[in-house]
Amino acid sequence: MTESTFKLIAIIIYMAAMLLIGWYAYRRTANLTDYMLGGRSLGPAVTALSAGAADMSGWLLMGFPGAIYLTGMGEAWIGIGLTVGAYLNWLFVAPRLRVYTHVSSDSITIPSYLQSRLKDRSPLLRIASGAIILIFFTFYVSSGMVAGGVFFESSFGLGYHSGLIIVSLVVLAYTLFGGFLAVSYTDFVQGLIMFLALILVPIVGFFMTGGPSETFSTIREADPNHLSLIAGTTVMGIISSLAWGLGYFGQPHIIVRFMAINTVKETKSARRIGIGWMLLSLIGATFTALVGYAYFLQNPQLSLSDPEAVFIELGQIIFHPFIAGIMLAAVLAAVMSTISSQLIVTSSALIEDLYKAVIKSDAPDKTYVLYGRLAVLAVAIIAFILSWKQNDTILALVSFAWAGFGASFGPVILLSLYWRKLTSQGALWGMIAGAATVIIWKSYLKVHFGNLYEIVPGFILCMVVAIVVSLMTYRPNPDIQNEFDETIETLARER
């Protein structure tokens, strides 16, 4: 068999496994809570790895190693910021959000939680937050589909559109039928594949470059600054990189995992597993870049046209074609895990937060599950149409959307969990201020402030506006006070 055949077999096995998991989850999905939140039954390992896989996407295996390969260790500040942000998110948000969403009307989405938590009688806050999720994630999903199409084009020589169709159909199939459980279980498997790939490639790669000492000597001889965290960076650049960590508090497709874990006590185990996975994966991605840099210096007859393909290229060089196919599956896993997570959150926003908020009907749960599946299909079709023509502006929206979610939802989520006096008006205007600041800063002001990442001013302004407006509009509400107290008591009892 040819090398391409071995690789294709590995990819087919991987995709078949994803569809099988989707079928298994479909058998376990009976109502809307099952479809949107897995019946709040996830174990700590599945919660941790599914959150990590949904978060990292292709950035972990392609974007991050590519950046370090190209410009050096100064790019590692983003990884440091993300790790700290993820840890704080698990520590401060996960336990309280799991309890509070259950205490407050057993909310199954972030917008429905905010409406219930703040006792908002109008649907405005829920509709606004649902609309933000719907708009940003439709483009987010399309960017993942573009990445999937490019992956098949570069790895197997298939046409871009053929790759796009394959990825879209497989992700759509297991997300459409299996819902949140399918997304979480497939993300768990995908997280394991990504982790193993990022550990194996640099370890075996070190043997090919003469060991760690010889590898680092090769890098220093070529560029003494390549291994420095400081060289070539600016204070504003480091702040911007670290600020990526702020985004975690407001990412719906990540924090929804906290709502789905089985018990509060398990959040501690999930935090350790998740942060351990993240640390080792980021270290693996970093060493993949450095080993690749040294390898191609030592073998000048070989060339790497695209730095972001360093992980893929090393995998093809190091391993048997079938194992290399598994490495390719790891990249595909990173892309597909994020697409599926975003599809299910977008579906929940469309049905739970827009449709049910506007059209107050008492349809049975099975009807809403059907509507949820139709919403997944509709969003996937729109995203597919947007991605049919490769468009770099869609891919550029990934970092922009991260800032948008982090700045509009992050401060509001934190305040809702830790401050009794947050009001619906404060939350609404804080979200608007955060989102507007990100857009304006990105479009007009960023270049005048040392290219400071837009999440920094957006997060700060959202926090300030939410607090000021809440203090101006606060009225004591016994229901809010009782739920807040019950949440704290439940936390103390169940931890």
Image (cartoon, rainbow, N blue to C red):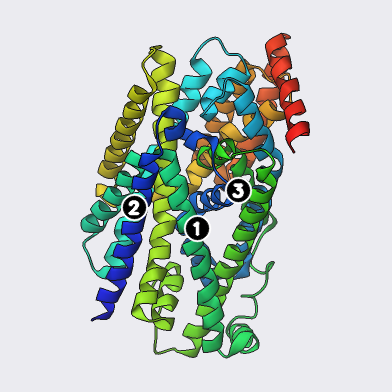
Disc 1/disc 3 C-alpha distance (Å): 14 Å
Where does label 2 land, which residue? 20
Tell me the element at label 3.
helix
227 up-or-down from 331: above or below: below
Q: Is mark 1 in CB contact (under 8 Å) with mark 3?
A: no
- Which residue corresponds to mark 3? 44
Badge 1 amino acid: Gly
The residue positioned 25% from the left and 54% from the top of the image is 166
Q: Residue at x 39, y 33 (%)?
A: 347
Q: Total of numbered circles in the picture?
A: 3
Determine which of the numbered discs, if any, sits on residue 208 in the image.
none
Q: Nearer the viewer, residue 86 or 6?
A: 6
Residue type at mark 3 is: Pro
Q: Secondary structure at mark 2?
A: helix
Quarter of the picture holding the N terminus: bottom left
**Mark 1 highlights which residue?**
191
Q: Earlier in the sequence, mark 2 or mark 3?
A: 2
The first of marks 1 and 2 along the sequence is 2
Q: In percent of the image, x 67 and y 26: which residue is there?
A: 416
Q: Position of residue 142 (x, y in %)?
A: 34, 45
